């Protein structure tokens, strides 16, 4: 079987076509320079590609997208180049099994199998026989090394990795696609519709959640207006190391996230939004105010950037698209605390809340209507802990705001999802968010 191999600077997801085709020599140059490019494999006479290989060595990434005859993506493989430059980890994959030619690409009812593998041998295989509309079966896959890893081929020597999926029995013969009038590649003008290497979850409008007058939506309520943040209290961090974690963590494990800050006492406040909705119980339109995030304010200097804080075992080189990391909680609770006094502060929290010891010195309930619920303090060090409620048991990212000089100015945890900014009819943000 003859297979045509073409190269391009990018792959357009909207048109399912290569963007700015390049010659094999240009692709080789980009491969050597570790710049992103794609390789497109087509069977002669077949409109849809057999597979598209997406390469970005500077991101330690190679992706593989496999297409069926209808042009639907049937397999998505994320491979990573780690410490050993001679092999690639099959980091993450999704296989869609369409039930018929009429089923739309990525239909929520499409059966699929997801494989999530880590280099230390851990992994998870998730089967969803009814797609996202039904239940799932999760198991730890027992895979040999050669199924977790693959040898890294040299440029121009990649096989058709999806040959078995397409039923190709004999090794194909390759032909290079001809490119006429190829422009010099430039990375600045790549359209937003084109593929890019995977990125972890990105910060949304975090600063705007604390800016009164900004309009946002959570996807359920069409319009919500940010009101003045509510100051709840303060937290003493004499050690200079802030802990952000779930207080229901296994005792002795230590805090999940730590952020260095200057030793001191910092304001705790709560972002809030006001919105109206129809209440069936009252049979009337009602207006309410709800919290969206909690913050430890280190400085009044505005944040120029926001970043997701990493735990000690987090490796950004393994993050898949939109992956989050943070602290886990089963009790729908997080906390800010002085990491230098973590053990005594958590011990007081457990004794006061879980055991309910009466008259316990160093513990108090602070149920004042805010998201902050308990406070503990360590007499020996002066460090404090303040717990806050979330909206459920899950993983909550910790967002660290930095000023232009790179110093920490605030630490934020969203108690629910990240809202989106609303724009006016002319496409501009409200005056308060501009």
Image: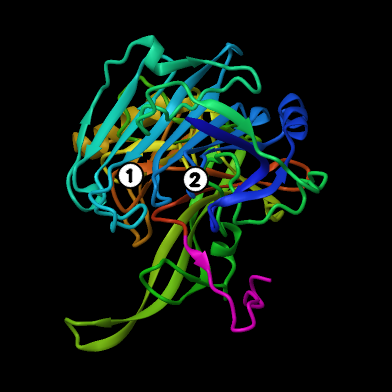
Residue 278 visible from this viewpoint: yes
Q: Is residue 417 left or right of residue 420?
A: left
Front residue (pair 382, 430): 430
Asked if labels 2 and 1 touch by Cβ distance under 8 angstroms, the answer is: no
Q: Is residue 36 part of the magenta span, yes or no?
A: no
Q: Is residue 254 left or right of residue 317?
A: left
- Element under label 1? strand
Residue 357 visible from this viewpoint: no
* Image: magenta residue range: 419-434
Q: Which mark is residue 145?
A: none
Q: Is residue 195 left or right of residue 168?
A: right
Residue placed under numbered mark 2 in the picture: 45
Residue 357 in the image: state x and y as whole percent: 20, 35
84 over 327 or under it: above or below:
above
Residue 321 in the image: state x and y as whole percent: 49, 41
Residue 9 in the image: state x and y as whole percent: 69, 43
- Element under label 2? loop
Mark 1 vs 2, N-terminal side:
2
Which residue is located at x 59 percent, y 81 percent?
A: 424
Q: Residues within 10 Å of mark 2 (few under 14, many from 20)?
A: few
Which residue is located at x 70 percent, y 40 percent?
A: 178
Residue placed under numbered mark 1 in the picture: 333
Front residue (pair 416, 410): 416
Q: Residues within 10 Å of mark 1 (few under 14, many from 20)?
A: many
Q: Is residue 422 part of the magenta span, yes or no?
A: yes
104 over 328 or under it: above or below:
below
**Residue 210, quarter of the rendered image:** bottom right
Which residue is located at x 61 percent, y 39 percent?
A: 264
Residue 64 in the image: state x and y as whole percent: 49, 34
Q: Marks 1/2: CA distance?
A: 58 Å
**Residue 75, quarter of the rendered image:** top left
Which residue is located at x 77 percent, y 34 percent?
A: 26
């Amino acid at each position: 079987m003859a297979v045509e191999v073409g190269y391009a600077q990018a792959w357009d997801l909207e048109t399912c076509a290569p963007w700015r085709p390049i010659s094999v020599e240009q692709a080789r140059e980009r491969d050597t320079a570790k710049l992103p490019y794609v390789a497109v494999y087509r069977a002669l006479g077949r409109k849809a590609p057999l597979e598209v290989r997406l390469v970005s060595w500077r991101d330690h990434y190679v992706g593989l997208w496999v297409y069926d005859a209808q042009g639907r993506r049937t397999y998505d493989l994320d491979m990573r180049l780690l410490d050993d430059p001679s092999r690639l980890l099959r980091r993450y994959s999704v296989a869609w099994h369409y039930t018929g030619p009429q089923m739309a690409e990525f239909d929520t009812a499409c059966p699929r199998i997801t494989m999530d593998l880590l280099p230390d041998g851990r992994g998870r295989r998730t089967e969803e026989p009814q797609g996202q509309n039904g239940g799932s079966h999760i198991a730890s896959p027992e895979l040999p090394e050669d199924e977790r890893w693959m040898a890294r081929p040299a440029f121009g020597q990649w096989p058709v990795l999806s040959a078995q999926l397409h039923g190709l029995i004999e090794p194909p013969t390759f032909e290079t696609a001809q490119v006429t009038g190829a422009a010099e590649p430039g990375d600045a003008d790549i359209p937003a519709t084109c593929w890019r290497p995977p990125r972890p979850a990105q910060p949304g409008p975090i600063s705007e959640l604390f800016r009164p007058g900004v309009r946002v939506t959570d996807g359920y309520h069409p319009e919500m207006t940010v009101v003045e943040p509510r100051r709840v209290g303060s937290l003493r961090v004499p050690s200079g190391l802030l802990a952000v974690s779930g207080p229901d963590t296994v005792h002795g494990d230590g805090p999940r996230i730590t952020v260095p800050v200057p030793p001191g006492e910092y304001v705790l406040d709560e972002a809030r939004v006001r919105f109206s909705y129809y209440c069936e119980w009252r049979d009337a339109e009602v207006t309410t105010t709800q919290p969206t995030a909690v913050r430890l304010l280190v400085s009044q200097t505005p944040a120029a950037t926001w970043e997701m804080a990493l735990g000690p075992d987090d490796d950004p080189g393994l993050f898949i698209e939109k992956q989050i990391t943070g602290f886990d909680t089963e009790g729908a609770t997080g906390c800010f605390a002085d990491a230098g006094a973590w053990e005594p502060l958590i011990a007081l929290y457990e004794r006061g809340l879980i055991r309910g010891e009466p008259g316990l010195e160093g513990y108090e309930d602070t149920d004042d209507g805010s998201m902050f619920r308990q406070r503990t303090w360590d007499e020996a060090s002066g460090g404090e802990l303040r717990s806050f409620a979330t909206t459920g048991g899950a993983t909550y990212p910790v967002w660290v705001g930095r000023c232009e000089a790179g110093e920490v100015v605030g630490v934020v945890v969203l108690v629910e999802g990240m809202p989106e900014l609303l724009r006016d009819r002319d496409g501009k943000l409200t005056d308060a968010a501009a």
